[in-house]
Image (cartoon, helix red, strand yellow):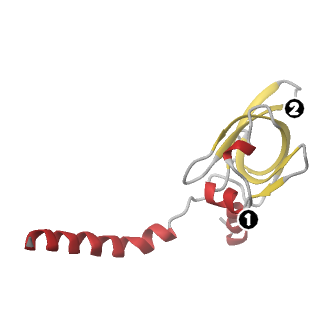
Amino acid sequence: MQKNAGYLALVGHTILVMMPTIALAHHSFAAYDMAKTASAEGTIKEFRWGAPHSSLVLIYKDKRGGEAQMSVVSGSPLMFGKKGFAPKDFKRGDKIKITYHPNVNGQPGGALASLTFSTGRTFSDDEAAKAYRRGE
């Protein structure tokens, strides 16, 4: 019985020590050029609602007029939820316009700044905006 109490105390202490670390952890935006924005429009191929960040695959027309795809990382599901969005709001085939911070490696895609549905409903990514202000 005393061994169990010691074990529980150790586990409890470990959780308390780790909580600030977990709360402060965040995704780095170093892979994206936060000083630049680009825009694209197309259709949603896939939307991944998941932690720590959601993401989408956009089918769009490239500079030559051909069909291309890009992956764009976005905010957490909690952020979407706080702004009134749910997974059902992002359907394959939905027409959208996005503004994003491009990948620093020059590949298509980046970090979402905002997304606008054809209905006019808009999502702005607060995590990317905070990273931009911090200079990440």
Quick one: label 2 or label 1, which is nearer the N terminus?
A: 2
- State left or right for residue 117 relative to residue 56: right
Q: Position of residue 119 (x, y in %)?
A: 90, 46
Residue situated furthest top in the rendering: 66
In what quadrant of the picture does the C terminus appear? bottom right
Residue sitting at x 8%, y 74%: 2
In what quadrant of the picture does the N terminus appear? bottom left
Q: Is residue 65 above or below residue 103?
A: above
Q: Amino acid at mark 2?
A: Lys
Residue sitting at x 45%, y 67%: 22
Q: Position of residue 77 (x, y in %)?
A: 62, 54
Q: CA distance from mark 2 to mark 1?
A: 27 Å
Residue sitting at x 50%, y 65%: 25
Asked whether the residues under the numbered discs 2 and 1 touch, taking CB atoms below 8 Å apart as contact, a structural biologist would say no
The residue labelled by disc 1 is 129
Indicate the secondary structure of the residue bearing disc 1.
helix
- State left or right for residue 73 relative to residue 37: left
Q: Amino acid at mark 1?
A: Ala
How would you rate the neighbour count of disc 2 (Cα within 10 Å): few for under 14, some for 14-19, many for 20 or more? few
Question: Residue 66 occupies which quadrant of the picture?
Answer: top right
How would you rate the neighbour count of disc 1 (Cα within 10 Å): few for under 14, some for 14-19, many for 20 or more? some
The residue labelled by disc 2 is 63
Residue depth check, mark 2 versus mark 1: number of the one nearer the observer: 1
Q: Is residue 76 above or below residue 69?
A: below
Q: Position of residue 116 (x, y in %)?
A: 85, 49
